[in-house]
Amino acid sequence: MQDEFCRPPGIVVTRDDIPIVKRGVRMMNKEIFGVFGDRDEFERFRSDREFDDVVTSDIATVGIRDTGLGIPGRSASYSGERGSCIIWGEAYPNKRGWSEPARWLLEQYEKKGKEAIEALNGSYLAFIEHEGDAVVLTDPIRSWECFYTDGPGVRVFGSDAAEVAKTIDNPTMRRQSVGEFLHMGVVLGNKTLFHELHRTSFDGYLTRDEVGELDRFVYNEQKMDYASELADRMQRAIRRRSRQPGRKGLLLSAGYDSRTLLSQFPEIEHCYTVGVPDAQEVKVARRLAKQYGVNHTTLVTNDRYIVPGEEKVRDTNGIKESIHIHHAGYNSDIEVDTMYHGLLFDTLLRGFGQKRKEFELLGKRIPLKQMEMDPDPVEASFDNFGYLPDKSRFIAEQYTDDLDAANEFVSDAIANEFDRCWERTDSIQNALSLFSISNQPTIPFRTHLADNYLESFIAADTELLEWHLQTPPEYRSTATFIRAIRQLDTDIFRHRPPDRPYMSTLLSEMERFARRKLPFVKNFEPAWPDRKLVYDRYNLDQRLFPEYESIHELPPRHKLRINDMVGWVGQCSETVVSPIDVLHLPTDDNEVDEIRSEH
């Protein structure tokens, strides 16, 4: 049973010089991997038999593996006399490029250079080689990461951080990244857990000797009917993704986002909700599925919900925590080919990350519709990530006597990274949104889905991104979103979310307070199962850290983060690291200065 959990390969390592016994690690089902070099350079690291197609030239060689290769709207590959092109992920060119999207993109690149990528809609990485030039480009919000290293003497890049990291002879842990992962559950910016491994910039590109940014994702507010425009754009974005093959499914909650997709995708055959059958969230999700005539399955919460298995940790890429992959343990129970989800609808379309005015009601802070005029970006960003001040203070006590060390560390990390946002906006509220989008901690959720199904990232549609960039922060709100989806379906709120019984936030919060105080009245239940309860019920301390009793005293969320880091490093390098090592990697001043110099 031990091998099904993510621990360092073969044996548990300690601070002593103990040799590591490597074990076989599953490759991701879908991957793009390349080198800025010829075929011989490529074969130093990988075999072409690992890929469905390999395009090669004297300046770059790239392999692609994807079950969706050649399906309209999915990955595509082309190689000819004038160059080569690979589109990996989900991409929708204009109508003229629909039948041969990779060839079409290469032809556009001949005419426009890097600007050609502006005409490609979707969630993707694109590689183009033409007349001695080779470039890798991300989509506008870097919904797929491109990792790269110059460690082996040639620039290597790819979508799977572990495979790129394996080409580095002696990777070294980056203390700043370990601290960010430990306290926030995310490594900020373009860093990874290793000094030698990097990420292509947000809205960016990568060449043999350059890493740069494009200007697709820049705020430019416009006047329009925001709700109607959003409704029309959502409808088109959904229609673009309705042609996926096979049986279609949806990860369904009782909230606003996934029910919108359910109401607009008549092709969906099956919905899945993680939880226990009698939970309020599951009951409402079941009613929604019945309302739209779709089969529903409850993925019952047990140890599969929380155990960070090898596949689950691999999908974090060592930069985000695995806890967000709620469905990871249930692949055997999901019987669809294409899977839809509403990830980032809240961030891009409903203003998650922005800071609104609040007032205190009976000891609880209630958000208002009005925007905060001059919020502190650090404090406003605390809640957008997995930073838990009291718990992090306890973690910091393990490696320092400074009781405020964790708060100072997180504040400095956010402030340093937040400075990048001003190049794309001059508004504090837009900068808060951009900071949240460019460092989104929930991305492993879609990474796992995309690796196991034909997945559509609807929120990354170009038209919806344009709506986000053109809409003032005060209109990027739940109220605008509700008006929009009511235009799509007037009956969409027949069954209300269990924790929002009224359209008014104030009234819903007042009932929440009353339920907490009144006897014999049941409280609103949280949307997700209690992680601590599940962690303790299935004795994960003994299953994950049997040799490290001192780790057992830490909060469950942080223990899982430690396991994610130790497990990911163990999958891709010979670096000796243990849970205790991770806890005792405080940031030093030299590395803070190094991070600042990168800006």
Image (cartoon, rainbow, N blue to C red):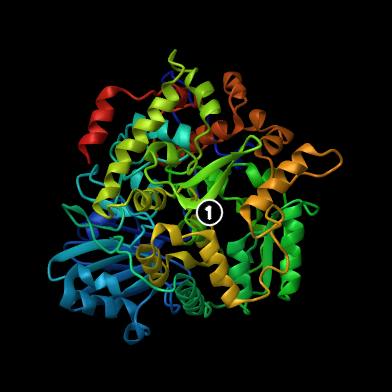
Between 421 and 366, which is closer to the camera in this rendering?
366
Residue 457 in view of the camera:
no
**Quarter location, residue 341:** bottom right
Q: Residue placed at 66% from the left, 71% from the top?
A: 492
**Quarter location, residue 502:** bottom right
**x and y, in percent, of residue 587 in the image:** 35, 25
Considering the numbered disc 1 on the image, is that residue within a helix, a strand or a loop? helix
Between 123 and 45, which is closer to the camera in this rendering?
123
**Quarter location, residue 229:** bottom left
| Residue count near mark 1 (Cα–Cα under 10 Å), binned few <14, some 14–19, many ≥20 | many
**x and y, in percent, of residue 355 in the image:** 45, 47
| Image position of 575 (left or right of 598) | right
Q: Residue placed at 17% from the left, 62% from the top?
A: 59
| Image position of 340 (left or right of 140) | right
> Which kind of residue does numbered mark 1 sit on?
Phe
Please identify the residue farthest to the top as the structure is shown: 401
* Picture mark count: 1
**x and y, in percent, of residue 88 in the image:** 38, 66
Image quadrant containing the N terminus: top right
Q: Residue placed at 28% from the left, 23% from the top?
A: 589
Between 470 and 251, which is closer to the camera in this rendering?
470
| Image position of 239 (left or right of 533) | left
Q: Residue placed at 59% from the left, 69% from the top?
A: 260
Query: Mark 1 = which residue?
Result: 445
Between 79 and 354, which is closer to the camera in this rendering?
354
